[in-house]
Image (spheres, rainbow, N blue to C red):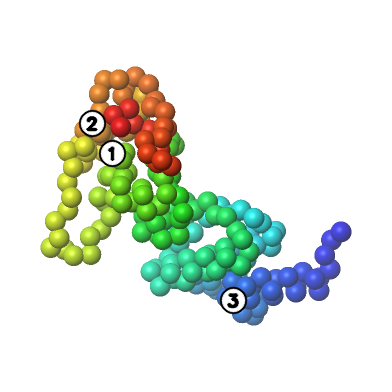
Amino acid sequence: MNASKLETDELVERLMSEVGLSPRYAGSFPSELSGGQQQRVSIARALALDPEFIVCDEVVSALDLSYQSQIINLLERLQRERGLSYLFISHDLAVVRHISNRIAVMYMGRFMELADADELIDHPAHPYTKLLLRSVPVPDPGASRLRSAEIRPDGAALSPAPQAGCPFADRCGMAEDACRESVPALREIAPGHFAACRRL
């Protein structure tokens, strides 16, 4: 049965209020809204179907830090109030660590590592995960950066992925010939901690 206009208007007003927007924005065009307001509208649209699971693909990547914080806080509140589960996709490791219970690291469409958030950030195992963490900006310009012999020099980053084997092999300082012959399986290297690397 189709909802009446009154029921639709009431639903829109309730959802906008739930994501922190005034109902007066209901008739606005996207160009009339800020980036943070646009994200709130997108979240409200997702909530309209009363989901249990939401895919958040780069939901804060285009926002400045203040808006990022607001949207993350909103997602966490909605998760508590509605019992939601999220698949949170992002290149921002600080945001990923803050919002995630478990993290899966992917490279060239394949899982490289999977573990609880704190375990993966504090004890990375896969060379690609270590490279990602090393690339996070350091707040102190005078602080030394951790270097690792497990990662080849940055020039190797331009190499195309091998046709067979581990997609990270040409960038990995730990790679052996066997790494280029078959794709390593994602296997448990510690309780609840998985990595796709034959050297681990």
Instruction: Please give the residue where the numbered disc 2 appears in the rendered image.
Output: 174
Determine the image quadrant of residue 200: top left
- Of residues 11 and 97, the one nearer the viewer is 97
Please give the name of the residue rendered at 30% of the width and 20% of the height, measured from the top-left corner: 178
Q: Residue 197: percent from the left, percent from the top?
A: 34, 31
- Asked if marks 2 and 1 touch (Cβ < 8 Å), the reply is yes
- Asked if marks 1 and 3 touch (Cβ < 8 Å), the reply is no
Among the two numbered marks 2 and 1 on one chain, the one whose residue lies closer to the N terminus: 1
Instruction: Please give the residue where the numbered disc 1 appears in the rendered image.
Output: 127
Amino acid type for the residue under numbered disc 3 = Leu
Q: Secondary structure at mark 3?
A: loop
Judged left or right of residue 196, residue 73 is: right
Among the two numbered marks 2 and 3 on one chain, the one whose residue lies closer to the N terminus: 3
Please give the name of the residue rendered at 36% of the width and 59% of the height, measured from the top-left corner: 94
Residue 117 higher or lower than 198, as above or below: below
Label total for image: 3
Disc 3: CA contacts within 10 A as few (<14), some (14-19) or many (>=20): some
Judged left or right of residue 42, residue 157 is: left
Q: Secondary structure at mark 1?
A: helix
Res 126 visible: yes
User: Looking at the image, which residue sits at the far right?
Assistant: 1
Q: Which numbered disc, 1 or 3, marks the residue closer to the eye? A: 1
Q: Which mark is residue 21?
A: 3
Among the two numbered marks 1 and 3 on one chain, the one whose residue lies closer to the N terminus: 3
Judged left or right of residue 140, residue 104 is: right
Q: Residue 162: percent from the left, percent from the top?
A: 34, 26
Q: Which numbered disc, 2 or 3, marks the residue closer to the eye? A: 2
Disc 2: CA contacts within 10 A as few (<14), some (14-19) or many (>=20): some
